[in-house]
Image (cartoon, grey):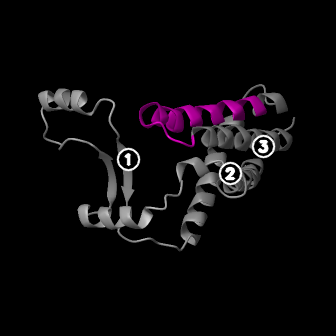
Amino acid sequence: MKKLLIGALVGGIILFFCQFLSWTVLNWHGNAYQYTPRQDTIMSALSTQIDKDGQYMIPNLPPDATMKDHEAAMKTYAGKPWAVIAYHSSKNINMAPNIFRGLIVDILIIGFFCAIISRMNALNFTAILISALFVGMIVFFNVPYTHHIWFQDADLMGYFWDCLVGWALVGVWLGWLYKV
């Protein structure tokens, strides 16, 4: 239990620090949040056209659209511009709660991983490192990659490196901690 708690705490901090670096110093996700000099005009237009916080895919159809409407829309919108907009009516600049929640989640994630590897029969450095890399790839394929298939996210490679590097470092740490 002691190894699990220490592994989760330090491993969660390692994963959190890797994520922090990838979004700041390394800027692996910069492509997803590009600047446009027309931002004031765009925000002004959005705030007059969108009445509630949410994510919007444009163009789209209302929820009660028929299959015939969907088929017609596919033909009409094929090859034309489209956008996914995450709209918020107010910007919250207090990052502390999000940073804290992110760290707690990373510690929990690594705690779950420690619970899994502590039950492995062949517990050694290599097995733990490979298991961590597999989990990192599962994380990558499960959400960022499958989301990218449909929405062509600009920072897919940022997520790939997040998963590969972060989980590799966690695997090295836990491989050392759990060495038999």
Instruction: Examine the image and state in which quarter residue 87 appears.
Output: bottom left
The image shows residue 130, relative to residue 55, as above or below, that is above
Specify the label residue 25 is tagged with. none
Q: Which residue is mark 3?
A: 169
Residue type beneath disc 2:
Ser
Instruction: Examine the image and state in which quarter residue 67 appears.
Output: top left
x then y, percent, for residue 63: 18, 42
Residue type beneath disc 1:
Val
Q: Which residues are magenta?
A: 129-155
Q: Which residue is mark 2?
A: 22
**Distance of mark 2 from mark 1, alpha carbons?**
23 Å
The label nearer to you, 1 versus 3, is 1
x then y, percent, for residue 84: 37, 47
CA neighbours of label 1 inside 10 A, class few (<14), some (14 to 19), many (20+): few
Specify the label residue 84 is tagged with. 1
Residue type beneath disc 3:
Leu
Task: Name the side, left or right, on which 43 lies relative to 160.
Answer: left
The image shows residue 28, relative to residue 54, as above or below, that is above
Task: Name the side, left or right, on which 83 lies relative to 117.
Answer: left
